[in-house]
Image (spheres, rainbow, N blue to C red):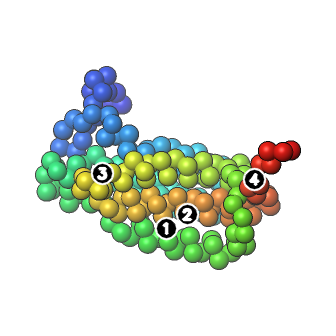
Amino acid sequence: MAVWGLGGRLGLRGCLGSRRLPCPRFQSRGAPGVEDGDGFAMELITEKGHPFAEELEKIQCSLQDIGSALATPRSSAREAHLRHTTFEAAPILQLEQWIDKYSSQLPPLTAFILPSGGKSSSALHFCRTVCRRAERRVVPLVQTGETDANVAKFLNRLSDYLFTLARYAAMKEGNQEKIYKKNDPSA
């Protein structure tokens, strides 16, 4: 399979069913950006021996499914394609379980924290930022009925998971999280 194509030069991207759409629709496909960041974080986490690297790999697979759902516009796709690319709720429920598992082991938040806590934690915070951006770009597609609402819900829960996991990684690695302090203009 070729990794390049002429459509990219014309500002178009392929959709399931061979339809080509303008790139702005694919800007919402922040899922690949999240997936790339997730892969980078997973490499750092694997080096540290964290057991949750397998969870991140499952998430990468879910992000591939999200990419398929986003590349299949509901308004023009055939029913067979829509059935094939529907994003189910099971991965969302799995994220919620993981969030609860790690949250129960963390100290309660008493202040805003800054992205920090070591390389693994910082990489997860970065992934969360990319994930939030993807979620904001997907919401209009959900509102217009062009993609499954579970896509936006998954990205929302994923950002919560990445935040929780960043805190958990910092704790497990013995790194301090930096606390937000309002700048004093008189100082």
User: What amino acid type is highlighted by mark number 3?
Assistant: Leu
Q: Secondary structure at mark 1?
A: helix
List the residue tagged with mark 1.
95
Query: Looking at the picture, does residue 58 appear above or below residue 100?
Result: above
34 with respect to 89 (left or right) = right
For the residues marked 4 and 1, what is the alpha-carbon distance in whole angstroms? 32 Å
In primary-sequence order, the first of circles 3 and 4 is: 3
| Three-letter amino acid code of the residue under disc 2 | Tyr
Q: Which residue is mark 3?
A: 141
- The disc at residue 161 is 2
Mark 2 nearby-residue class (10 Å; few <14, some 14–19, many ≥20):
many
Q: Residue furthest right?
A: 187
In this view of the protein, can residue 68 be seen by the observer?
no
Label 4: element kind: loop
Q: Secondary structure at mark 2?
A: helix
Q: Are marks 4 and 1 in contact (CB under 8 Å)?
A: no
Q: Amino acid at mark 4?
A: Lys
- Discs 2/4, front: 4
Nearer the observer: mark 3 or 4; the answer is 4
Please tell me which of labels 1 and 3 falls first in the chain. 1
Q: Give the label on residue 182, or none.
A: 4
Residue located at (65% from left, 77% from top): 104
Q: Are marks 3 and 4 in contact (CB under 8 Å)?
A: no
- Judged from this view, the residue extending furthest toward the front is 186
